[in-house]
Image (cartoon, rainbow, N blue to C red):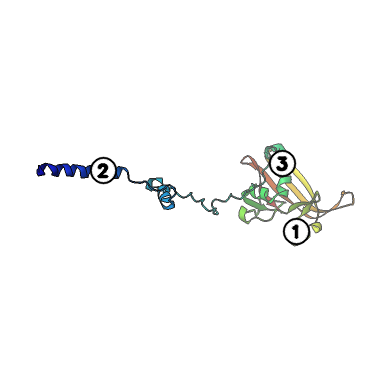
Amino acid sequence: MKLQLVPFALLLCMLSACDSASHAPGAPKDDPVTAATAAAPGASDTVAPPAQTPPVTDSAAPAATVLPDPSLPESACTPDGFREFFEAYVDSASVRNAYTWADVRIGRYAAPKQDARSVAKAGYRDFRIGAVDYRWVYLDPAIKEPGDYPRLDIDIKPKDKTAQVEYVKAEFDAEDNLVRTVGDRGAYVFELRDKCWYLTQDLR
């Protein structure tokens, strides 16, 4: 009989342990430590920090607006549009730079082909016709005040694909009538090349 009591007692012990485990008290609902532990996210619940906004650098800044050089209307680059072209050429340094040929022939007014020489565009600085108060003037580099520039009498002679602008210093009366000319004449020759007019000769 004693050998049969040992397994029965062991069985009772095992049943008693399982019953105590199933009735173990849960964590108190109001326990702050337990609540915090339960609310803490696991490794898979980790919230990534918000992505940082990259700082604005010079490369991200908007590019400065670059204004284009003054352009000519198509009509100015036609055989009949030379007068319009010439006014723009006189008025704008950008137009002069764009529409001066790669080399300018410097010659004599009385004999253009005699003793002529070429000057590269980059070194040519001798265009002297300007406009002040709607009047043609000679841009003398020795004169500082625009109002003191000598006035010019201009004669524009376009012919086919060539236009010669003759000029001479002159004096005018109060009503802008020509009184007399002063000194020698000069001329600038423009030719219709590469779809527009270009300064190609300076005759003195």
Instruction: Report x, y in % for residue 83.
Output: 74, 42
Of label 2 and label 1, which has the lower sequence position? Answer: 2
Look at label 2 and name its amino acid: Cys
Quadrant assignment, res 76: top right
- Badge 3: residue crowd in 10 Å (few <14, some 14–19, many ≥20): many
Look at label 3 and name its amino acid: Phe
Task: From this view, report whether residue 76 is shown above or below residue 119.
Answer: above
Left or right? Give the position of 62 relative to 84.
left
Q: Secondary structure at mark 2?
A: helix
Q: Secondary structure at mark 3?
A: helix
Of label 2 and label 3, which has the lower sequence position? Answer: 2
- Badge 2: residue crowd in 10 Å (few <14, some 14–19, many ≥20): few
Instruction: Report x, y in % for residue 176.
Output: 87, 49
Q: Say which residue label 1 marks.
A: 140
Quarter of the picture holding the N terminus: top left
Q: CA distance from mark 2 to mark 3?
A: 113 Å
- Badge 1: residue crowd in 10 Å (few <14, some 14–19, many ≥20): some
Q: Say which residue label 3 marks.
A: 82
Q: Residue at x 57, y 51 (%)?
A: 61
Look at label 1 and name its amino acid: Asp
Q: Residue at x 73, y 41 (%)?
A: 84
Q: CA distance from mark 3 to mark 1?
A: 25 Å
Q: Say which residue label 2 marks.
A: 18
Mark closer to the observer (2, 3):
2
Report the front residue among 93 and 59: 59
